[in-house]
Image (cartoon, grey):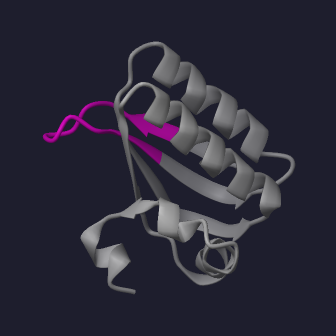
Amino acid sequence: MEMRLRANDAQGFDTVLLKGDCDLYNAPKMKTAIINRIGTGMRKLRMDFEGVAYLDSTGVGAIIQILQAMKTVTGEVVFRGITGAPRKVLEMSNVISLMKLEQADAAR
C-alpha cells in the first residue's frame, strides 16, 4: 500500500492519502506510521481511502487503534473516500458508526 502525507491544510488537518490494499501485509505499517505521528504532536488527521479497494480485518483493527490513539490525545480523525468493498466491511463490522465521515461520504 502506498501512503502519502500532506501536512496542515487550511483547517489544520494532516491528510494521509492511501492507495492499494489495507490488509494483513500493509495495515500494520500504516498504523505504526500514523500512531508515531500522533506521538509527535499530530492532533487533526484526515484519512483518505479513495485509493483503497480492499480492506480486511487487520485494516479494520488498524483503524480502531488509530481512533483510540487519537482519542487518548483528544485529537480528531475524519475519513473520506470510503466506498465499495471497504465501506461494506466497515458497515458489517459496525466500525463505520465509530468513524467521523466527511459530509459527502456520510450521505452515501
State the residue lying farthest toward the top: 40
- Rendered residue at 69%/72% (across/down): 93
Residue range highlighted in magenta: 4-16
Toward which corner of the image does residue 19 lie, by quadrant? Answer: bottom right
x, y percent for residue 62: 69, 46
State the residue lying farthest toward the bottom: 108
Decide: is 75 above or below 53: above
x, y percent for residue 27: 74, 46
Query: Is residue 14 magenta-colored?
Result: yes
x, y percent for residue 10: 13, 40
Decide: is 28 above or below 93: above
Left or right, 16 with respect to 31, comes to left
State the residue lying farthest toward the right: 24
- Rendered residue at 66%/37% (across/down): 31
State the residue lying farthest toward the left: 10
Decide: is 63 above or below 49: above
Q: How many marks?
A: 0
Left or right, 20 with respect to 66, comes to right
Decide: is 26 above or below 23: above
Toward which corner of the image does residue 91 lie, by quadrant? Answer: bottom right
x, y percent for residue 99: 46, 60
- Rendered residue at 62%/28% (across/down): 33
Quarter of the C terminus within the rendering: bottom left
Left or right, 84 with respect to 25, comes to left
Query: Which residue is at the front of the view, 90 or 24?
Result: 90
